[in-house]
Image (cartoon, grey):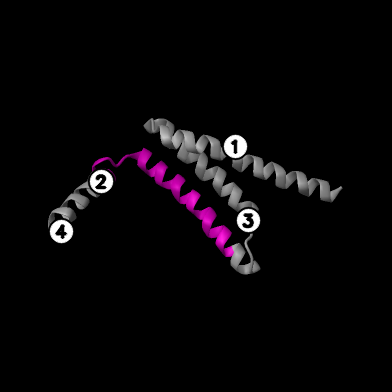
Amino acid sequence: MLINLSRDVGGYLYEVFVDRFDVWLLIGIFGQLMFTMRFLVQWIASERAGQSVVPIAFWFFSIGGGLITLIYGLYKKEPVIIMGQSLSLFIYVRNLMLIFRKRSGAAS
């Protein structure tokens, strides 16, 4: 049973990552890596501050990764990715708008 499970998982991973390999897979992986970077940026900033912090770089990585992942989802016709990233991109941009509005208000 364990050998069959191992063979099935290996076959699945081979099909997904090797048989279906193309430039779009690379684009999707790049988008996901950018999206993952936001968590690393947030974690490092929070550790340095000793409290939970969300730096601006978090939102830029969110927009970059979300946009690339949305493009990937549109090309692959993945409705879950399209719906999730469309709403998320709006939220990321809105957060940056709020941050810049607060900063410009504080500067004047």
Real-space Cα distance between discs 3 and 1?
A: 17 Å
Mark 4, secondary structure of its residue: helix
Q: Sequence-wise, which precedes: disc 2 or disc 1?
A: 2
Q: Residue at x 54, y 44 (%)?
A: 64
Real-space Cα distance between discs 2 and 1?
A: 34 Å
Label 1 crowd bin: few (<14), some (14–19), many (20+), radius 10 Å: few
Give the total number of marks visible in the rendering.
4
Identify the residue under disc 3.
54
Identify the magenta region. 16-44
Q: Is residue 24 above or below residue 10?
A: above
| Disc 3 residue type (three-letter) | Val
Q: Quadrant location of the N terminus?
A: bottom left
| Disc 4 residue type (three-letter) | Leu
Camera-side mark, 4 or 2: 4
Contact between labelled residues 4 and 1, with CB atoms less than 8 Å apart: no
Identify the residue under disc 1.
90
Contact between labelled residues 3 and 4, with CB atoms less than 8 Å apart: no
Residue 18 tag number? 2
| Disc 2 residue type (three-letter) | Val
Real-space Cα distance between discs 2 and 3?
A: 36 Å
Real-space Cα distance between discs 4 and 3?
A: 43 Å
Q: Position of residue 82 (x, y in %)?
A: 46, 33
In the picture, measured across the screen, residue 13 lies left or right of residue 2, that is right
Q: Position of residue 105 (x, y in %)?
A: 82, 46
Is residue 106 covered in magenta? no
Q: Main secondary structure of the magenta part?
A: helix
Contact between labelled residues 1 and 2, with CB atoms less than 8 Å apart: no
Q: Position of residue 100 (x, y in %)?
A: 73, 45
| Disc 1 residue type (three-letter) | Phe
